[in-house]
Amino acid sequence: MMIMRTCNRWLVMLLAASVAVMNAPARGDDNSIPHIVQKDGRYALFVDGAPYLILGAQVNNSSGWPAVLPKVWPAMEFMHVNTVEIPIYWEQFEPEYGKFDYSVLDTLLNQAREENLHLVLLWFGTWKNGSNHYMPRWMKLDPDRYPNIVRADGQFIDSPSPVAKDTLAADIQAFTTLMRHLKEADPDHTVLMVQVENEPGAWDGVRDYSPAAQALFDGPVPDEVLAGMGKSGVKPSTNWRDAFGADADEYFQVWCVSKFIGQVAAAGKTVYPLPMYVNASVRDPFKPGRPPKYECGGPNDNVFPIWKAEAPAVDLLAPDIYQRETAKFLKVLDLYHRADNPLFVPESIGQGAYARFLFAALGRGAIGFAPFGLDYTRTFDSPSDPNMTAEQALSPTALNYELIGPMSREIALLNFEGKLQTAVDEREPRAPEPQTPPTADAENPRLEPPDQILHFESWDVPVWFRPMRRFDINQSAVPAAPLPPNGRALVAQLGENQFLVTGLYSRVGFLPAGAAAKKPWQYLSVEEGEYVNGVFKTSRILNGDQTDWGLIFRANPSVLRVTLYLR
Ligand code: DGJ
């Protein structure tokens, strides 16, 4: 397996060579360190010199301890994960001021290597879900030196002050020590990225009213914030309230938090420049309201310019997506898929039909995706189905990664080159239609209007998610196969008339488009197979019932190379 992966890597590296030569740092530079490359507004995470797709899972919050790892690795194997997101706890890492304990980090590195897995480390430092709960005891017991936020009513709230200089200094010292050790202990780059803090901000108040914070609030807004938030026209010495009115408290808190974390990330990067990101507890994408309705200070979609200006060492701002409605989930993906921001989903719901959103993320160029809480500690179970077994909780992600895993390098490259599109069933989970087969279906499913159409230059690709009586796409041997809406499809252009097509619970067709629109066409071949060492190996050629009604994808992984011709 190890050898196969290595060969595969080399072949994909060759494939990627043209791209890499254009975009990667010059030879002799830090080319071997994982890094993010941008081309025409698209992004790739380069690992070992070629685009890499993070097919990840995040462990539960207290699963990063050596005693618990036996409940982590088997779950990762079951899911075919290639990268595990796992916390580093400041309270464990620096139990006494200035004394660092590398034992847990070293255990993680050693065991991940044995499992042939990459890691993304989550620095549970000053902020964890807006609180200071992972600060070491010596900090918690010294609140004068490492204070929390003071609210307008004078109450301390459960959230660290972002203007506390000693907290910043302590975090920088701990984080740079972590990165220094990582640089020495991880020459082969088991660790691909580092998350700096976790969902920073504050939940129970909007900003800090301590005297130090208030003095800054009454002072001038920095130019880069004025420019970023579209206020370049105001007088340079304008204070926060005058510049931003009702938004002033929120923007000020965002400025304080982003500046703090920007400094932590920059210091860590000076030591060891791995890609770094900050995750947001995202606000409602349609009706956000105002903080404290949502966590205030993190990289929400309305304050990107402040984060980008104050934390340039942070490579990307990432959404944690727990939105249960399809429209909201997709909207959040859209909001974080921007020309100035690589899309990476470090946390999401992974159970049931939510797994299909991996495909939605890929269609928006994501460099990786990781559902939260998927290990065998059963800590984070599906709130919608408390009786779900562990296998049932993990299976939807396992199915995704079993399908995409063997060709993840190819997918990352095709995406980076802008050749890949996806469709997911966009119906809401509780919509009544999924259980009702369309009436015309028994007659001629080819005439059914598709649910979505993907558009390539000279081919349109209709995709259907509704059940079809003749060859039921929801037939499944998978445990707890999710109920519709569960459909997903991925189509990537390999040549003028050739496509890679895969999916689950869906049906895919083709139609000539552009100058060839309405011309008669046929499949020249529909090859089912898999990528081996970067080369597509055909195991059989599909025809007859398997192609006459469209290309049907159920719950068994199937990858097709489709060649078309005009008659
Ligand atoms: C979001 C946080 O970032 C995670 O660490 C975890 O607490 C999840 N929420 C689930 O509760």
Image: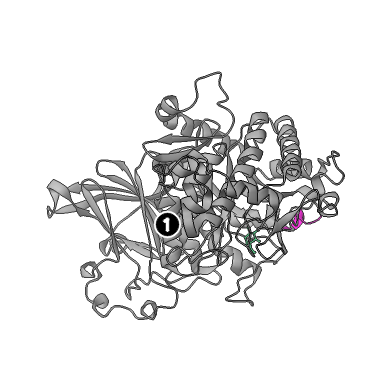
Query: Is residue 364 shown left or right of residue 355?
Result: left
Q: Give how far across and how far down residue 281 sits, in percent.
A: 57, 59
Query: Could one spot residue 83 in this view of the protein?
Result: no
Q: Give how far across and how far down residue 480 sits, in percent.
A: 55, 72
Q: Is mark 1 within 8 Å of ligand 1?
A: no
Q: Which residue is mark 1?
A: 360
Q: Residue at x 67, y 61 (%)?
A: 151
Q: Is residue 518 magenta?
A: no
Please determine whether, in this image, residue 492 is positioned above or below residue 359: above
Q: Residue at x 85, y 42 (%)?
A: 97
Position of the N terminus, as image quadrant, is: top right
Q: Secondary structure at mark 1?
A: helix
- For the record, the magenta segment spans 67-71
Q: Is residue 70 magenta?
A: yes
* Badge 1 amino acid: Ala
Q: Residue at x 66, y 34 (%)?
A: 267
Instruction: Give the image's coloring scheme.
Output: one colour
